[in-house]
Structure formats: structure tokens, C-alpha cells
Image: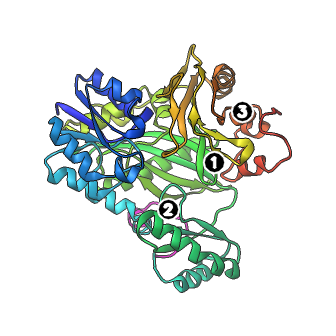
Amino acid sequence: MRKVLIANRSEIALRVIRTCRELELATVAVYSDADRDAIHVREADEAVAIGKPHARESYLNAEKLIDAARETDADAIHPGYGFLSESSRFAGACEAAGITFVGPPPGAIAAMGDKAAARRLAGDAGVPVVPGTDASADPEASLRGADGVGYPVMVKAAAGGGGRGIRIARDADELRGLVGDAAREAEAAFGDGSLYVEKHLERARHVEIQVVGDRHGKVVHFYERECSLQRRRQKLVEESPSPALDPSTREAMARAAVRLAEAVEYTSAGTVEFLVDEDDRFYFIEMNTRLQVEHGVTEMVTGTDLVREQLRVAAGEPLELSQDDVRPNGSSVEFRVNAEDPERDFQPAPGRIESLELPGGPGVRIDTAIYPGYAVPPFYDSLIAKLMVWAPTREQALRRGRRALEEFRIEGVATTIPLHLRLVEDERVVAGDVHTGYLEELLASPQEVGETA
């Protein structure tokens, strides 16, 4: 591997460029018309324009991305996350073009991309799954399946991800009224309107296990991340380790994640996601076959550069680490800073950043590609920065997070920073006593987001 094209934008493109530079790999950035002045374009060794601002005409256009790799003689493509990172077709197109895809093989992506099929594979590997049904394009099948599972249920898109196509029904009448909307959303988002039904575990936690596999049959886990603070199933805060897992549950969940990765001959970095109920029983929900937005908290507690591991695995090198080498240290928390207005139902807030002051000091990491004068475009995800902190204990990490959030000043666009300041003062959050619905319960309370408890 000599030269890597990063088929992405903004902070994740910059993140990959930095590791490539340390590995002395040349880099190629791609950019839409909206990203002409982006930092990742300036920092790469080369840059190629790939089209108009809308993602379908640029970052989601596989043909343009492969043409850009050929034009610059790049022999590898790193997809980042989002866009085409979990497209088995794109991974296959890279292989067909003789370009190394820095990610898992197309077969593993396809196997895990069909959520209902992934459930079956997990069950076959001895990994506990939430009670549910097979996928079907027939709404009546969802209704029949729900009766067998027992209400409340979640109806999910078989090809889904990112929370799209998901609905919760507490009885048959409610399910009958929403399956059509769920199928249409799934069809629009993924080109597949098939649905399946799962038992809805109320007050469950969302915990995921980071794994990395090489091409020599070795899979290593890097322990867990707690991701329960979510709004509309979109994560806002992640941390490692989880404040809720006891050692035996942690080990059992990690072993289950490795078994699943081995079963699908997984290579590269991936995340096996679980729900944990109030009795500490865990259930597989899906596998994300890519680098996660929140990978940095794992890097901070394990001292491992996960992008470096991806690149080495893609080059055919074996993992240097054994499982015994992975020893978590301390506590790390990530706060997603989105250009959204919490006071206006989290409406996206694109615009020009008039001034910017970034936090620093011991144990503080900022992954961002914004700068004073930068225009946040309206065409893409609203994430503009990831503030991550590390400290020897969770209590110290939360205090450090509060200090860093207070130092983090952005003028010109609304952000989620005021919400994060509220969260680090919230008694339940500080105690680690949360679940996937807790943040929405908190937002429904009368306190204003900009105030603290």
C-alpha cells in the first residue's frame, strides 16, 4: 500500500490523513463543491473534485470515487464512516478495480448489512439475540410476528442503520398504523422496504464491543463503549468503559462479539452492538462493519490507533496485539458537538463560524475540521466536532469534560454544547444510571437545555 484515497469528508477524512502521514502513506482527498475550502482538502497530498454538494452526486457516487483513485494512482480507498463505508457493492467495486478497500470484505458487509440475516448468523454463533421474526416485505407478516413476540415491539428495516425505519408499537392497532410508514422510509433510505419485528426492551442500555480482525483468522476485542445517551436513536454521548457492566457480563459480551466476527470471517475494525436489560442480560442487535464515530474513546482507554490497525490489516499484515495485550486504562467520554439548535427541536444550524475557541489541557482531544470563517454546509450530517476526554476515573473524566465544554466556544452557529453541559451535571448521568430513552425523558422535563441542574 502506497497511496490512500479517503472517500469521505470533514473530521473523519482529516483523522485518516493524520494516521496515513504517520505511516508515511501518501493521501488523496476528495471534495464536493461545498467542501472546496475544507481542511481535509488542504492537508492531503492531493485532492480531487468529485461533483456537486449533494452526496448522491459526490460522496455517494462510487464511480467518481474509483475514477479519482485511478486518476491519482491511489492503490487503496479508506471509506471513513457513513456514505459508502458499509456498501458491499462499493467494496466489491474497489476489489474489481484492483484497489484495496480499507474495511471488511464484501461478503462480511453484506452478511451483517441485512439485519435480519445478521440475527440468524448471531444465533448460529451462540450469541443471544432479542426475540423477533424474520424479514418480510408483507406488512401482515409483521403483524403476525408481533403477536408471537409479544408487545411492545420494534419494527425495523431489514437493511437499516442509523435508526431509520424503526418504529415502536405497544399493541396491534398501533403496529398496523405504522408498518406502512416504516416500509416507505426503509425503501426510500435503503432501497429495500422489508421489515422485521423485535421485542422492545424498555429501559435497556446500548453497549457495543469494538473488534478488529486480520486476514490470518485472528480477532481481538477492545472492550466496550456505552452509548445509551441517544436522541431519536442517534448517539450524543459515548464512554468507555460502561459504568453498568460487571466483569463477568463484560467478558461474556466481548467473547460473544469475537465469536460473531470469527463466524463471518471478519477483517478490519467493526463494532458488535448489544442491548443490556435491567437484569444484565445482553442481546445482539446489529454489527456495524466500519469505523465508528466514537472510536476515539476506545483509542484513549486502550492506547490503540484503530485507523492504523485498519490500514495494516488491509495491507495484509497480521495484528501485532494479542488479546492479553489489550489492557483498558482509565475512563474516556465523547461529546458529539453538532451544529443543531437544542432549543428548536434540534433543527440543523448550518452557517458561518464567526469565532472559535477550542479547549485543551491534559486528557483532552478534539477531532474537528472547523475553523473561524468556515461555512458549515447544509448538505451533510450536522456533526462538526468530537470532544473527547480521558482521566484515571469516570468521575474525573466527567469533571474534565465539564471544564473542556466550558472552554469550547463557537459563535455563529447553534450547537449541542449547552445540552452537554446540562448532561454532565445531571444526577442520573453522573451516577451512570441511564438507558436509551433517558435523554428524551430528560428533554421532556421543564428545565431549559441551557440551564444546569
Q: Is residue 365 left or right of residue 68?
A: right
Circles 3 and 1: CB atoms closer than 8 Å: no
Task: Give the secondary structure at mark 2.
Answer: loop
On the question of residue 304 being in view, the answer is no
Colour setup of the view: rainbow
Circles 2 and 3: CB atoms closer than 8 Å: no
Q: Is residue 406 left or right of residue 359?
A: right
Image position of 46 with respect to 253: above or below: above
Mark sitting earlier along the chain (3/1) = 1
Question: For the view shown, which residue lies furthest in the right direction?
Answer: 446
Residue 47 x/y as whole percent:
27, 32
For the point 42% across and 39% down, the residue is 34
For the point 49% across and 68% down, the residue is 186
Question: For the view shown, which residue lies furthest in the top direction?
Answer: 361
Residue 285 x/y as whole percent:
50, 59
Task: Give the secondary structure at mark 3.
Answer: helix
Residue labelled with disc 1: 230
Looking at the picture, tell me which residue is in the foreground, 218 or 313: 313
Mark closer to the observer (3, 1)? 3
Quarter of the image with the C terminus in it: top right
Image position of 334 with respect to 264: above or below: above
Crowdedness of circle 3 by 10 Å Cα count: few (<14), some, many (20+)? Answer: many
Q: Is residue 314 left or right of residue 343?
A: left
Q: Give the magenta range.
A: 121-134
Image quadrant of residue 89? bottom left
Image position of 235 with respect to 161: above or below: above
Magenta-colored stretch includes residue 32? no
Residue labelled with disc 3: 418
Mark sitting earlier along the chain (2/1) = 2
Distance between the alpha carbons at the discs numbered 2 and 3 = 38 Å
Q: Which mark is residue 128?
A: 2
